[in-house]
Image (cartoon, rainbow, N blue to C red):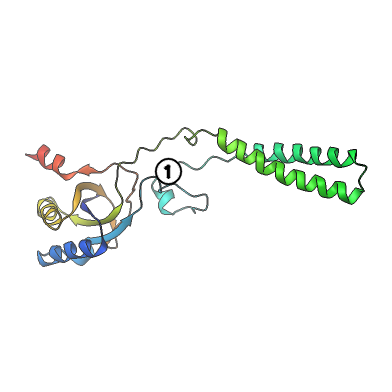
């Protein structure tokens, strides 16, 4: 595991200026990376994630299957209602089939909306309490000896929410960064060390 210090900036140019200050103080390009962190609530795992992806490597729970019973029940009810209404008018078979199809479609839409309205906001018992703000994160791979200097440079360059973390630093980037993980403010770490 590597020691990492990071700071949040509002724009890429501000983060790039901070990176330049780090380079001027002897930090290497392979030890500094910039990336954008999405706003809170936009870090969900998508069903299209493949094994070995970032989502898979951060040990997020797999999505449970979504059951669309509302759409099924609505489609069946709509088809039956469409057939009954048009049969009452002694309509032709093609008209009854079209009425059944239209009723099934409308019923499935209504059933889906009713199911979505009644669905709880918490998905599969998992509640996400994200505390990380969005913005450009400048992360620096540091050592015990250079971490205080990196934090100071980030702070002086206008970085907000300077944090300290441990993680995997591979090929010049923080490879196991998880935006849903609560950041550990660097000030708390510095006070614990004092």
Q: How many marks?
A: 1
- Where residue 68 appears, x then y in whole percent? 63, 40
In terms of depth relative to the viewer, which is nearer, 108 or 69? Answer: 108
Residue at (73% x, 41% y) in the render: 75
In terms of depth relative to the viewer, which is nearer, 163 or 53? Answer: 163
In terms of depth relative to the viewer, which is nearer, 52 or 186? Answer: 186
Neighbour tally class for label 1: few under 14, some 14-19, many 20 plus, Cα within 10 Å: few
Task: Identify the image quadrant of residue 109.
Answer: top right
Q: Quadrant of the C terminus?
A: top left
In the picture, measured across the screen, residue 123 lies left or right of residue 183, that is right
Q: Secondary structure at mark 1?
A: loop
In the picture, measured across the screen, residue 113 lies left or right of residue 182, that is right
- Where residue 4 appears, x then y in whole percent? 21, 52
- Where residue 180 appears, x then y in whole percent? 35, 44
**Residue carrying label 1:** 60
Residue sitting farthest toward the front: 89
Task: Identify the image quadrant of residue 87.
Answer: top right
Residue at (75% x, 44% y) in the render: 104
In the picture, measured across the screen, residue 173 lies left or right of residue 161, that is right
Residue at (63% x, 41% y) in the render: 112
- Where residue 176 appears, x then y in whole percent? 33, 51
In the displayed structure, 46 sits above or below 121; it is: below
Residue at (10% x, 53% y) in the render: 152
In the picture, measured across the screen, residue 138 lies left or right of residue 54, that is left
In the displayed structure, 166 sits above or below 67; it is: below
């Amino acid at each position: 595991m590597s020691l990492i210090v990071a700071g949040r900036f509002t724009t890429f140019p501000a983060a790039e200026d901070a990176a330049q200050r780090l380079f001027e103080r002897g930090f290497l390009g392979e030890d500094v990376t910039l990336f954008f962190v999405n706003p809170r609530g936009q870090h969900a795992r998508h069903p299209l994630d493949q094994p070995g992806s970032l989502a898979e490597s951060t040990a997020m729970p797999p999505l449970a299957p979504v059951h669309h019973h509302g759409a099924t029940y609505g489609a069946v009810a709509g088809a039956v209602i469409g057939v009954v209404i048009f049969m009452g008018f002694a309509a032709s078979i093609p008209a009854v089939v079209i009425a059944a199809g239209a009723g099934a479609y409308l019923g499935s839409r209504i059933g889906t909306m009713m199911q979505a309205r009644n669905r709880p906001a918490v998905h599969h018992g998992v509640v996400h309490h994200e505390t990380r703000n969005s913005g450009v994160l400048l992360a620096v791979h540091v050592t015990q000896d250079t971490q205080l200097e990196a934090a100071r440079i980030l702070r002086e360059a206008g970085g907000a929410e300077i944090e300290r973390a441990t993680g995997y630093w591979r090929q010049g980037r923080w490879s196991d960064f998880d935006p849903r993980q609560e950041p550990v403010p660097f000030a708390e770490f510095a006070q614990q060390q004092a």
